[in-house]
Image (cartoon, grey):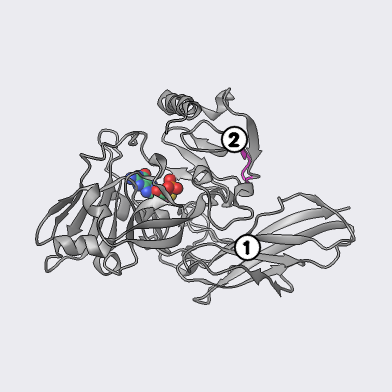
Amino acid sequence: MIDLTARIERRRALSLLAAGGAGLAAAPLWAQALVDLHLPGGNGARPLVTDFPGKGPMILQRSRAPLLETPMSAFDGQVFTPNDRFFVRWHYADIPTAVDVARFRLSVLGAVKKPIRLTLAELLAMPRVELAAINQCSGNSRGYFEPRVPGAQWGNGAIGNARWVGVRLKDVLDRAGIAPGAVQVRFSGLDTPPPDAPIFAKSLDLAHAMDGEVMIAFQMNGAQLPMLHGFPLRLIVPGWYSTYWVKALDRIEVLATPDTGYWMEKAYRIPATPGASVAPGATGFPTVPINRMGPRAFITNIADGARVTAQAPLELCGLAMGGASGVARVELSADRGKSWTPARLGPDQGKYGFRAWDAVTPALAPGEHGFAVRCTSAAGETQAFEPIWNPGGFMRNAIETVTVRAA
Ligand SMILES: Nc1nc2c(c(=O)[nH]1)N[C@H]1C(S)=C(S)[C@@H](COP(=O)(O)O)O[C@H]1N2
Ligand SMILES: [Mo]
């Protein structure tokens, strides 16, 4: 069934994509409203746009290649982030806008016994797996780094949780057969770099790729993968940052020597220090490729600076994540961390997804109140107030505080 309105919307959106580099400073006509991300370094205002294919209101960080952030209000009341509100991030402007599903092939080559080229029909006929997992950009919340670091100045919305359906990467690799001596597996997709730039490719160690959890998804929240999220196939690396979740995946190369490409050896590296933190401005420290996520928690029903009713209790709720393990507990503090009370946890939908939480405060005295929320992962990591710093602006997971005024 084809809905004409949707087609018109889509055409507008595609022309927007084609317009290229529409500068934020140009006060775009298509911006319906501005959202203030309250970035400590200033310039936190961003247009809220609805012109992208299949997208509702999104915070525009960049139009080409698209960087769209989810407004915090879209996370409220649900653990799964709807596809039309899910954040979008591509490195290169030349992203796939159509895929011929009959001609598409997923190649598995390199250090394998027999290179294969799978059709989508062959993949769809394989045993399926389903998993709830959080896709979070390495640079989510980078805009809150102090001092500021280069890169997209994201607020907290470069994150989302979806139900992914697909096949196990292990099953696909087994069809080709791993050759003796293989050490890593490299993934790349249909997006094209500009001349002289390296193709976007990421690698996992062989044991990780073969762990039976890493999957190749073709469905997201019950729908086929949207184009912006990597139609027809994307990698899902549960518990790991989304830089590894290669979209529009069409090439899997088994490597006999570790990947020395730009995206593993130069980009997306974190200090090899506890918490991936170094002194602001530090250079020359050893680094490792970014990997597992840590715990985080967000209040989603009240925005920072909200006015609430005094002499009444306040209901707070939100989302938490354990990172590479589940959520062990979520706690709330009304005194900036001196004391904590446990929040109630919602149903467990899998250790890699969001967990809902809620709590009710005592009646609020008139005046200002700061509510902090922190998560402890099943692996025993707890969020801290003290923010980390690294030059990439990666892995921020400091405790979030929401200040309200009761009157
Ligand atoms: N092919 C391809 N896959 C990619 C990227 C890319 O630029 N090209 N960016 C990665 C990064 S850094 C992020 S944060 C996620 C974003 O996924 P999403 O747009 O579905 O939210 O895609 C990852 N996969
Ligand atoms: Mo990212």
In this rendering, position of residue 30 left or right of residue 406: left
Q: Where is residue 162 in the image (x, y as percent from the top left)?
A: 47, 55
Disc number for residue 399:
1
Asked whether 147 or 352 is in front, the reply is 352
Residue bounds of the magenta highlight:
39-48
The residue located at (78%, 54%) in the rendering is: 404
Asked whether 18 or 220 is in front, the reply is 220
In this rendering, position of residue 108 left or right of residue 407: left
In this rendering, position of residue 220 left or right of residue 361: left
Q: In this view, does 47 lie above or below 355?
A: above
Density class for disc 2 (Cα within 10 Å; few <14, some 14-19, many ≥20) is many
Residue under label 2, please give it: 48
The residue located at (66%, 45%) in the rendering is: 38
Say whether residue 304 is magenta.
Answer: no
Q: Position of residue 285 (x, y in %)?
A: 40, 61
Task: Name the front one of labels 1 and 2.
Answer: 2
Instruction: First in sequence, mark 1 or 2: give its number.
Output: 2
Asked whether 290 or 359 is in front, the reply is 359
